Image: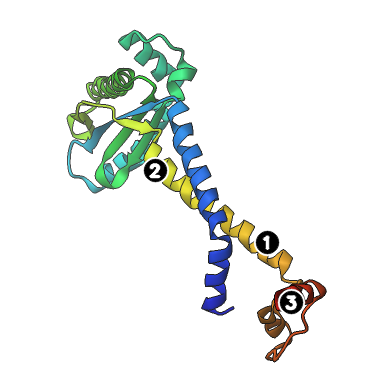
Amino acid sequence: MELKVYWQILKKRGWIILVAALITGVAAFGFSHFQEPIYRARILVSVRPARPDFGLTGSTKDLLRNFQTNLLTHRMAQKVIDRAQLDMNTYELLSEVEVNPEPDRFVMEIVVKDPDPQTAITIVQTMAQTFVDEQEAWNQEQDQRDRIDTWIVDDARDAPLWRPNPKLNAVAGLILGALIGAIIVFALEWAESAYIRTSDDMERAVGVRVLGAIPGEKSARRKARTSS
């Protein structure tokens, strides 16, 4: 279709797109205010071999995945609960924890998401410290050259709001609503494409220019009343 046709469709039914976008945008913004706020705390733990040996360095990268598994166990969760005196069980705690090993940087990222920002900070800090303490105890039994040194890069200081994000949700709602409105407009135009109402519709249907039209009964009556 020509741009002129699209413009005519927008002038005729553009309000549908605007209304649909407005409704979904407002709904998404309002829904965000009823969601429970979740706060996110993170901490980085450095994991490095005691000496710059190629074999030990490669083993350390592989160990990061093993450390990830160990941190996400009920054994570790119970240690964190007991040490921080948290009022939750291991299933609840593990559901809030993520551990992301980054072998190229020799670090592990520990992330905790909780409705209470201070609880999120406490969990992530306690878990990191417990892991470092356990690794230090393991190092004491190893030859100094074969040790894997671990330490907390920086303490968890804050837990910013992770969700909801009302502004982002509202924008997403506007976009979704606009798409829904466009689909509705397309469906209406497709449903009416089989009907010929104007000379332009006739020209598009048969590909021949319309030179004249026979007025219907109502049009003829209106013209008769006007001339009289």
Tags 3 and 1 touching, CB below 8 Å: no
- Per the image, the residue denoted by label 1 is 188
Q: Quadrant of residue 146?
A: top left
Q: How crowded is the residue under tag 2: few (<14 C-alpha within 10 Å), some, or many (20+)?
A: some
Looking at this view, is 218 or 94 the one in front? 218
Question: Of label 2 and label 1, which has the lower sequence position?
Answer: 2
Circle 3 or circle 1, nearest the eye? 3
- Per the image, the residue denoted by label 3 is 228
Which scheme is used to colour this image of the protein?
rainbow
Q: Quick check: 6 above or below 60? A: below
- Per the image, the residue denoted by label 2 is 168
Q: How crowded is the residue under tag 3: few (<14 C-alpha within 10 Å), some, or many (20+)?
A: few
Residue 98 pos. (x, y %): 39, 32
Q: Residues under labels 2 and 3: Cα distance?
A: 64 Å
Q: Quadrant of residue 76?
A: top left
For label 3, the SS is: loop
Quarter of the picture containing the C terminus is bottom right
Q: Three-letter amino acid code at disc 3? A: Ser
